[in-house]
Image (cartoon, rainbow, N blue to C red):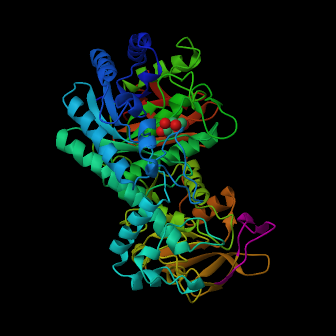
Amino acid sequence: MPLWYGGDYNPEQWPEEVWAEDVALMRRAGVNLVTVGVFSWSRLEPSEGRYTFGWLDRVLGLLADGGIRVGLAVPTASPPPWFSLAHPDALTVTRDGVRLTHGSRDTYCVSAPAYREASLRITRALGERYRDHPALAMWHVHNEYGTPCHCDHAAAAFRAWLRERYGGLDALNDAWTTAFWSQHYSDWAQITPPRATQYLPNPAQALDFRRFVSDEMLAHFREQRDLLRELTPEVPVTTNYVLAGWASVDHWKWSTEVDLVAIDDYPSGPGMAAAEQTAFAADLARSWAGGRPWLLMEQATGYVLGPRKGPKEPGEIARHSMQHVARGSTGVMFFQWRASRGGAEQWHPGMVPHTGPDSRVFREVSALGEALERIPAPYDGPLVEAEAAILWDEEAWWAAQGPGLPSSEIDYLAAVQQAHRVLWRQGVPTCFAHPSHDLPTYRAVLVPSLYLISDEAARNLAAYVEGGGTLVVSFFSGITDEHTRIRLGGYPGALREILGITVEEFRPLGEPVELPEFGRATLWSEVVHLDGAEAVARYPGGGPAVTCHRLGDGTAWYVSTRLDDPGYAQVLTRAGLAGSGVPGVEVVRRRDLVFAVNHTEDERPVPVQGTDLITGKPVGGRLGPGGYVVVRP
Ligand code: GLA
C-alpha cells in the first residue's frame, strides 16, 4: 500500500470551475487522499433535516474519477447558524458564564441534547449516502475535540459522571477535600463545573472536570463512530488530535477508541526548534498508537503559530514530513489544499498558495509527493525500537495547571519537551509511556515534573528500577495522589523510597545558581535529605541537588532543580544514556528502513550505507545540507 498524501480539501470555498483544476493539480502533486467536509455542515444541511448533497456528490465523483480517495468528515465541529439560533442552550458557556455566539467555530456544548441529536442526524445522513462510495477511504469525525462548556447541560452531565466515579457523596467529599472552605456537598445538585469563583477554585474539582470533559467528548466521538461502524464496518474511523499546548483530552484513553491515531502538528519553528518539535509530536503519536502506524492528519506548509507567521524554509516541508513517516505515519497530510482567499484563516498557508501552483511551495509539495511514492507504507506492527521512554500523562499535566501551586512557572510540557529534545540531540530512540505502562524493555525511563502519580504507577516505577532499570526523575514529581492530595511525610511522597531521599521544603529560585558539573539551575530548588541516595551535585549552600540511588538491580536519579539542556544532558550521560548521534542529523530506523535527515546547513556524516530509495543513488556516509535519504540497509 502506498503512503497517503494530501490534505484538507474545502471545495465549498471555491466556485465549481476551480474543482477540475484542483483535481488536476492534486494528480500532478501525487495527492491520493483528501479530507473533505470538515467544516461543511451549513452547506450540507442548510436547514434542519434538509440536505444538499448535490455538490458533495459532484466533488466526490471528480475525486474518484481522478483516483483520489477521501477521508470523509463528519462536520460536527462547526454547527450551522440555524442550529445555534434554534438551540441557544447548545452554545458554549465559558467559565465566566459568558454564552458565546455563533461566528467562529467549535461553538457548542458537547453535553447539550440538541447538539448530540443533530450530530447523529448528520452523521447518519452522510453515512447512509456515501457508505458505498468508491472514494471513501476513512471517516474523519469532528475536528480537534477540545471545547469545554460550563453550562447547565454540562453541569448535569458532570454530576452524572461524578456519581459514576465516586458512587456516593462521601467519597467525593473525601476526594475533593471539601472540608476546606466549607465546600462539603450534601446533595449532588449542589455541584457545578468549576465556574468563575471569587478566589482559588478547588483543585480536585478542576481536575475532575478536565477528566469529565475528555470523557464527555469521547462519548460524543463514540456515538458517531459506532453509527459509522454499523453502516460501514470495513472503513476506519478516526479523529485528529490537537497538540501543542492544548491538552484537551486524555490521549492514552482516546487512542484505544479510534481505529487510527491521527494528529495535527504545527511546530512553532523555524529551523532546529521546529525539527525537535516535529520529532516530539511524531514520537507521541506513535506511542499513543501503541508503537503501530498512525497518521499525520494536518501540518502546514508554513508556520502558523505565534505573532509572526510565514512560509517554512526551503526543504523544511519535506524534512518534517520525513520525520513523521520515519516514525510510523501512514501518510503526510496538510491543512489545507488551497489557501483560502477569505474567512478567518485566509492567512493560513496551503499546498497551493495564494500565488498559485507556479510557486516554490507547490513545487516542493509536488516533489514531496513524488518522493513519498517511493517509500513503502509502514507495516502494521511495532515500528521503532525505543531505548528510552519518557512518562507522559495528561492527568498529571492538568493537575500541574491547578490553582495556587508553589510556582506559577512550572511548565509540564516544557519539561517533557526538554527531556525529549536532549535525547533527540543525542540520537537516542525515544518513546512515551503512561506511568502505569509496562516499562521493562527500556534502558532508561525519564520522569519530567510528573506532579500527580497514582499508587499503581509508583509501584510500577519501583518494580522497573528494582528489575534493573534506570529512572531519572525531575523536580515536582510524585507529589500528589490522583485527587491532587499531597502525599505526606516529605516530598516526593510517591517516590521517596525509590529515590532514597526526602524533600523537606521547596525553594523556588529567583536568581539562577551554578552547580558544579551540571551548570546553571533555575526556577526551583529543594531542601533534600539523603535516605540511602548519594549526592552527585550539591547546591552552593551544600544541600544535595542531584542524587543517585541504587535500588535492587537498578538506579534512580533525582534532579531537584531545573537544569539547562547541557546540564540535563550531563545527568543522562552520568545515568548511562549517552547517545552517539551526529549533531543536527536525525537517524530513525523504522523496521527495515533507515531514514536520515540532515537538519543543518552543512554537509554532515551519516552512519548509513545503502541505496537511497528516493534518488536511487548510493549513500556514501555523507548527507548534503538539509538533505534526507531513505535506505533499506
Ligand atoms: C487546526 C485545525 C484546522 C486549522 C488549523 C490551523 O489543525 O484542525 O482546521 O484551523 O489548525 O492551523
Q: Is residue 507 magenta?
A: yes
Magenta stretch holds residue 468: no
Measured as percent of width and height from the top left, residue 545 is found at: 68, 75
Q: Give the farthest residue toward the right.
A: 511
**In percent of the image, x 22 and y 26: which residue is there?**
133
Given residues 121 and 34, the one toward you in this image is 121
Q: Quadrant of residue 569?
A: bottom right
Q: Residue at x 52, y 21 (%)?
A: 364
- All told, the count of numbered labels is 0
Q: Is residue 60 left or right of residue 447?
A: left
Specify the quadrant that holds the N terminus.
top left
Which percent across, then down, holds residue 302?
59, 30
Residue range in magenta is 504-525
Give the percent coordinates (x, y) of residue 269. 63, 39
Question: In the image, 383: left or right of 173?
Answer: left
What residue do we see at 48% from left, 44% from top?
106
